[in-house]
Amino acid sequence: MIDIKLIRQDIDTVRKSIHDRKARVDLEEIQALDSSRRDILFEIDNLKMKRNENSAAVGKGNLAPDEKGKLITQTKELGEKIKQGDQKIRELEEAISGKMQLIPNILNESTPLGDSEEDNPEIRRFGEPRIFDFPVMDHADIGTALDLLDFPRGVKLAQSRFTLLKGAGARLERALINFMLDTHTGQNGYQEIFPPLLVNQNAMRGTGQLPKFEEDLFKTTTGLYLIPSAEVPLTNIYNDEILREEELPICFTAYTPCFRSEAGSYGKDTKGYIRQHQFNKVELVKFAHPDQSFDELEKLVRNAEMILELLELPYRVISLCSADIGFSAAKCYDLEVWLPSENRYREISSCSNCTDFQARRANIRFKPKEGGKNRFVHTLNGSGLAVGRTLAAILENYQTKEGGLIVPKVLVPYMGGLTEILRNH
RNA sequence: GGAGAGGUGUCCGAGUGGUUGAAGGAGCACGCCUGGAAAGCGUGUAAAUGGGCAACCGUUUCCGGGGUUCGAAUCCCCGCCUCUCCGCCA
C-alpha cells in the first residue's frame, strides 16, 4: 500500500508511476472519497469534543438537577449524530482502503521504463553457454531417460503440473536445497527459518497477494492459503511489530515448497519441470533501513547469483522495466539461467525491493535511534534460488554425449560422493 | 471435542463506570556521579488520525465487532487468539 498522503500532496508522482506501469487506477475517485472523509471526520470530532465536555460536566456533579437533565438529553442527541457520522466514516474508509490496496507500489527512479518484457535491460552476464557437439536434449527428456523425473505419475497422483522426483533426481533436488541453505546461512549471513506453509488472509494481504491476486492461490476449506512463496510467511514474521533500528538489517532464508494455481498460464511451459503447481524454492527476505534498502538489494542479488556461480551455470541479470515489474516492487532484478534446449535465458530468481509498500500493509515499523516517530522498514525478497528450475538447468547444462549427467562439483558432497549419473540402458 | 483461565503501551505488569492515556517495573534517551565503565540518582519516553506554516489544539485507541450509559480498559452479547487440564492423534 502506498501512503495516501502521496495522493493528497504529490499525485503527479503516483500518476506517473501508474502510467509507467501501464496500470489503471481511478485516483480521482480516491481523492474525492478521501476529502469527504476528512470533512465528516472534522465535523464528528467536534461533536465528540462537545460530548466529552458535557459528560465531564455531568460527572463533576455540581449542576442543578434540571440543568443536568437538560444536558443529558442534549448529549444523548449528540450521541445519535455521532453514531451516524462514525458509520459514514467507516464506510468511506472501507471504500478508500479497498481502492488503495489495488494501487501498485511507486516505482523507484532507477527502474527502467519500458512497454513490455522485451524492454528489460541486461545488467551483466556470467559464464559462457557451453558448446555442444551433439544434439542437446531438454531437461524433461533427460530427466525421464535417467528416471529422475516421472511426469505421468505426478499427473496420476494429482493433476497436470505435478511431478514425481525419483532416486538420484529426488536426491539432487534435496542436495540443491541443502547446498543453497548452507551457503546463505554459512556465507551470506541469513538466519534459517522453517515457516508454516499455510497462512491466513491477513498475512496474504500484508505482502500484497490479496486482495488482487486471489486466483493465483490455493485456498483450504478452513480459509487458509497455501503459500505461493516463503516471502509471505517470512515477511509477515514481523507483522504488526516494532523493531529496533540497531537490529536492521534482518536477513532470513527459508526452504519451502511453494504452491501456485497458475491460473491463466494455460499453454505456457506445459512440458517439463519449469512451471509447476508445487515447486521448491529457497527464499531470501530482508528487513532493511529505508536509507540502506537499495544497497541491500544489490547484496541480495549477489547472494542469489553466488549460487549460480558456484554451480557454474551461465546466467544473466536483467532489470525489470516499468511494464514488467511486480505489483509490490519498486525495483526488481531477475536472474535468468541459460537453458540450452531453448537456446535462451530463463527466469530462475526474482529479487525485489518492496520499499515500504509491504511494511505499510503489514504494519512493520522500527524505532529510530535518534528518537522521533516510528518509521516503516523496507522489505526485500528474492529467490535464492528456485530449486526446480535449478535442477532443470543442471540437467540441460551438465548432460553428456552418452545421455548421462555430470554432478556439479559443489553438489558432489551432498550426493554422497556421486559424480555422475549414468544411463542404464 | 469437553472444562477452566486470560488477551492492557517497545516489553513485563497494575487497574471492575467519571482528573486512567492509563500505577509500578524493564528497556531506551538525556543529565548527575566516575579516571573510564557498571551500579546508583534525577528527568524524559505510546500510537494512529484530523486541523494549523508552526507553537499547539482536537479525536480515537487497553484483541476485534456489536450493545448498555450523559460517560466504558472497567458492565452485557458475539467472534478471534493464547494458556492450563482432560480426550483424540503424527
Image (cartoon, coloured by chain):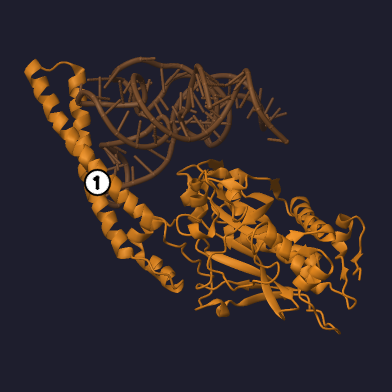
Chain colours: A orange, B brown
* Picture residue at 78% right of the left edge, 73% below the top: A141
Left or right relative to A365: residue A247: right
Chain at numbered mark 1: A
* Picture residue at 50% right of the left edge, 76% below the top: A113
Residue A424 drawn above or below residue A356: below
Quarter of the picture holding the C terminus of chain A: bottom right
Q: Nearer the viewer, residue A46 or B86?
A: B86
* Picture residue at 41% right of the left edge, 55% below the top: A3
Residue A192 at what x, y percent from top left?
Answer: 71, 47
Question: Can you identify the residue that label 1 sits on?
Answer: A88
Residue A18 drawn above or below residue A115: above
Residue A229 at what x, y percent from top left?
Answer: 61, 55
| Amino acid type at mark 1 | Lys
- Answer whether residue A349 is visible to the viewer in this image: yes
Residue A24 drawn above or below residue A171: below
Left or right relative to A263: residue A104: left
